[in-house]
Amino acid sequence: MSKPFMFEKPLGMRDTLPQLYDTKKNVRVDMEEEIARWGYQSIQTPTLEYYETVGVASAILDQQLFKLLDQQGNTLVLRPDMTAPIARLVASSLKEKAFPLRLSYHTNLYRAQQKEGGRAAEFQQIGVELIGDGTASADGEVIALMIAALKKAGLKDFQVAIGHIGYVNALLLDVVGNEERANTLRRYLYEKNYVGYRQHVKSLSLSSIDKSRLLSLLKLRGGSEKISEAKELIQTAEGEKALSDLSKIWDVLESYGVTEHLKIDLNLVMHMSYYTGVVFEGYGSRLGVPLSSGGRYDELLEKFNRPSQATGFGIRLDLLVEAIGAKGEDPSQTCIIFSNERRKEAIALAVEKREAGEAVVLQDLSGVEDMDEFSEQFAEVVYCIGKAKKEDGQ
């Protein structure tokens, strides 16, 4: 009788088989090489962090955190994102380094899922953080780099939506008057529940003009001309500054020559509450969910006592591979099957082939039950069997 859960995995956890593993590795290496060429240095942080610091600062919902206790009774979390751990690192181990800092990472992240969610609770993410630069050039750089990395990975048909959380916040607060009412509307936008947003706006006790302003927000999706249209809805200095920032970033991205992949989306709201400026999401044509995202966060590092402006992005490796449509292939391997008396000869041949760059499997003849079925796994099979010096192919 089998033990309970012997073949089951915890909710949201997945196995990665050899073909998919190799595909993801190749995509990751290509992107890491591109990111390094832009001057970003790789770092790594612990899988476990303290809940009271990184866990709280991460802005991930508390019910999505994997928590455990250490031997001293401290609450730990499996890292749910990389922005907060990097903020801790910048304020501690890198506190003597001058700004700006360009850091990159590749790591596994962990977010607990509800039973009905069907999402990965552990996933790989590759990304960058540009810390200590508050200019439009910095925002444009990370967006252009994300596009370059996606192209390098082999993604051809994709689009990046760019918005500004400062504009959304300014418009909603100006119209509805308080954070609680604004949060309700932001939630609809985050969930992309535009039908619910419209119905909620129509139910509010507002003038027809204010209702029209809120509903017109949903129309601010398209080319750069939407920035000019957005100016007609806003009446506050905060909103005007947000649009000015966005216009400058668009100019930077035009200089990079990447606007063919861009669209303005001024009702874009992210799940991370620490974003303060431009926000963006990348979409592949094969997916209905974002495969990458990022934005400006100028207040997070203050929580770690090293105030600084910062911006960055993260790319979900599993979603990217799905968007590319890469299926993976069995690796090209040579198998040398040997009998006991020709073991040394087989090993010497394997060393020679490996030094030449081939992938070689050594297999004792006595360990193979079905030779035909076993041989089908390899591009080439070399037999070292019997007492003769050379009987390859016999």
Image (cartoon, grey):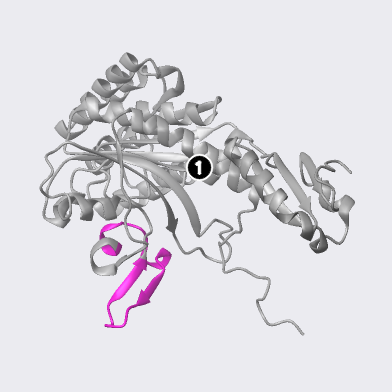
Q: Is residue 30 magenta?
A: no
Q: Position of residue 367 (x, y in %)?
A: 79, 63
Image: 309 above or below 256 = below
Q: Amino acid at mark 1?
A: Val
Q: Residue furthest bottom?
A: 1
Q: Which residues are magenta?
A: 55-77
Left or right side of 50 for 22: right
Image: 368 above or below 355 = below
Query: What is the quadrant of the C terminus in the image?
Result: top right
Left or right side of 106 for 12: right
Determine crowd level at label 1: few under 14, some 14-19, many 20+ residues with C-alpha closer than 10 A. few
| Residue at (30% x, 57% y) in the render | 58
| Residue at (50% x, 42% y) in the render | 195
Q: Is 88 in front, or is 372?
A: 372
Tell me which corner region of the image, top left, top right, bottom left or bottom right, holds residue 309: top left
In the rendered image, is residue 390 in sight?
yes
In the rendered image, is residue 221 in sight?
no
| Residue at (48% x, 40% y) in the render | 28
Q: Is 139 in front, or is 201?
A: 139
Query: What is the quadrant of the N terminus in the image?
Result: bottom right
Callout 1 secondary element: helix
Which residue is under mark 1? 195
| Residue at (83% x, 48% y) in the render | 375
Q: Is residue 59 magenta?
A: yes
Q: Position of residue 306 (x, y in %)?
A: 11, 50
